[in-house]
Amino acid sequence: AATGATTAAANADELLGGLIAPGMDRRSCRSRYDSWRYYKHFPYAPSPHLLRRLRAYEDRHRRCAPGTPLYAKAVDQLRSGRSAADLECNYVVWLPFDGLGNRMLSMVSGFLYALLTDRVFLAALPPDSDDLFCEPFPGATWRLPADDFLHVAKLFGVGQRPDRSYWSLVDKKEIAVPDDPAANATAAPPVPPAYVYLSLGWLLTDRIFFCGEHQVAIKKVNWLLQYSDLYYAPSLYAVAEFQDELRRLFPAKESVAHLLARYLLHPSNSVWAIVTSYYRSNLAPAGRQIGVQIRMYGHSSIPADDMYKQILACSRQERILPAAAESGGGGDGGNKNGTTTATAILIASLYADYYKRLRSRYAARGGAVGVFQPTHEERQATESLAHNRKALAEIYLLSFSDELLTSGLSTFGYVAASLAGVRPAILLTAFDHKVPATPCRRAVSMEPCNLTPPRDVECRGKAVDKEDLARHVRVCEDWEHGVKFF
Ligand code: GDP
C-alpha cells in the first residue's frame, strides 16, 4: 500500500496536478512526464474547470483530427469554398511566423482560442520546426497534413496583408457581421467562406478580431488560419464573450501562459536530450540556478560595456546575481556560506561576450559560482532545424531557473519566464540607443507581454466589464504600448 501511495504521489507530480493527460507513450516523448523534475517552481495548480475543459478538448481533438472521417468531411467542406452551419468539427490552423519564442506564444494563444471557441487546434509545422515539439494531445495528431495545407496555401498568399484576411472579406461583404448598420437588411446574409485568414501579426491587420460582434461572425467559419507572432491572450480577455470563461479557466490570470505552455509544449526527444545532458553535466550540481537571457536588437543597440553595466546594475537592484567576491558587498542574493552551496548562472545569448565577462567576474569564487553558456550562434537562423533545436533547448534550460534576468521585448525570454513560473527582472530596452535610466523592472507577473494589442478599434458588441479588465490586464513593464495579464 505504501508503494502504491508513493507512486500515486509521484504521478500527481509528473502530471502537474492533472494538467497533463496520463497514459501517453513515454518513449516517444520523454519530456512530457519528466520535465517536472527540473522545474524549480509550480506556483499555480490548474483549476478543476480548466482540467475539465482540457479533457473535453482532447476528446474533441481525437474525434476531429486528421485521419478521422470527421476531418475528411471538414476538408471536403474546405474544398467546396463555403462554410457549413452544421459541421461538427471546426478548426484553427496555426501558421508559422517569426522566431521560436514568437511561435510558441502564438501557439499558446491559438490553442487558448480553440479552447474558448470549441475548435480543434492544428499546426502547419514547416521543416525548420518539424522535430521540435511532441504531439501534445493523446491519441491523435496536431499536425495539419501537408497536402491540405498546400491546398489552402495555393489559394492565397501567406503574409501580413493577404487578400483574404478577415477584414477584407468583411469589407467585401462576403461575411455578415451581426447588427452591421451598413448592411442591407432585406438581402439574405451571405454564406460565409470555408476559411478565413486571420492576420494577427504585429501589423495586426485583423484587429477587429478582438470585437465581440466579429467573434459572432467568425463563429460561422469552419476553418480559421491564424498567422500571428503575438501572445494575444490578454486581448481576448477584453472581449465580453470570453471574459467569463477565461475567469473560470484561470482564477489567477498570471497563470495563463504558465499552465498552457506546460500543457501544450513538450520538447521532442532530440531537443530533450540536449537539455538534460547539458543540465546534468553543468547545472545539476548547483543548489541554485540563475538564468540570464541577453537579447540585443539592432534598433536599440548600445556599447557592450554599457550593456554589461546595465546587467550588473539590474542585478544589484533586483538582487539576482551573487557577489563577485566572497566578502565583497558588490552583489546580493549570494549564498551566505561561501563555497558550500554552488550557484550556476546560465547565460542564453547569441553572443559570447557577456558570458566571458561574467565568467571572469566570478573566476575568483572558484567552484562556488559557475557560469555557463550552451551556445552562441551569432545570428538568428529560424529556417534551420538544428539552430531551432538549440534555441528551444536553451529556453527550457532557462525555465529550470530559480531566478531570471531577461531582456525587454524578447518573446524568447517571455516564454522562458512563463514556463519557469518566475517573475523575471526585465532589462529595459535602450530606445534610440540611449542607456535607460532604470536598468530593469521586476515583472508584475510571469505572463508574456502582448506587444501589439488592438488599438483604435471601435467594437459594437457586448460591453466588457472594464473594472475587472483593469484589475487583470495592464501595461507591460518593458513596452508602454503592450498589455499583459497580472
Ligand atoms: P525574440 O526575437 O527575442 O522575441 O525571440 P524569438 O525566439 O522569436 O526570435 C529570436 C531567435 O533568435 C530565436 O528563436 C533563436 O533562433 C535566436 N536566438 C535569440 N536569442 C538566442 C539565445 O539566447 N540562444 C539561442 N540558441 N538562440 C537565440
Image: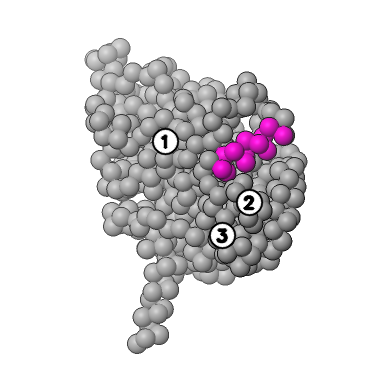
**Mark 1 to mark 3: distance in Å?**
33 Å
Residue 125 at x, y = what percent?
Answer: 59, 46
Left or right for 302, reference 232: right
Q: Which residue is mark 2?
A: 328
Q: Are marks 1 and 3 in contact (CB under 8 Å)?
A: no
The residue located at (35%, 56%) in the rendering is: 46
Specify whether 85 is left or right of 147: left
Ligand 1 lies under 8 Å from the Cβ of mark 2: no
Residue where numbered disc 1 is placed: 484
* Local secondary structure at mark 3: loop
The answer to which image quadrant residue 297 occupies is top right
Q: State the extent of the magenta-drawn residues as a range.
A: 305-316
Q: Earlier in the sequence, mark 1 or mark 2?
A: 2
Q: Amino acid at mark 1?
A: Lys
Residue drawn at the location 46% of the way across and 62% of the way down: 139
Crowd around label 2: few <14 · some 14–19 · many ≥20 (10 Å): few
Query: Which one is in front, 423 or 181?
Result: 423
Q: CA distance from mark 1 to mark 2?
A: 38 Å
Quote the CA–CA distance across marks 2 and 3: 12 Å
Q: Which residue is mark 3?
A: 335
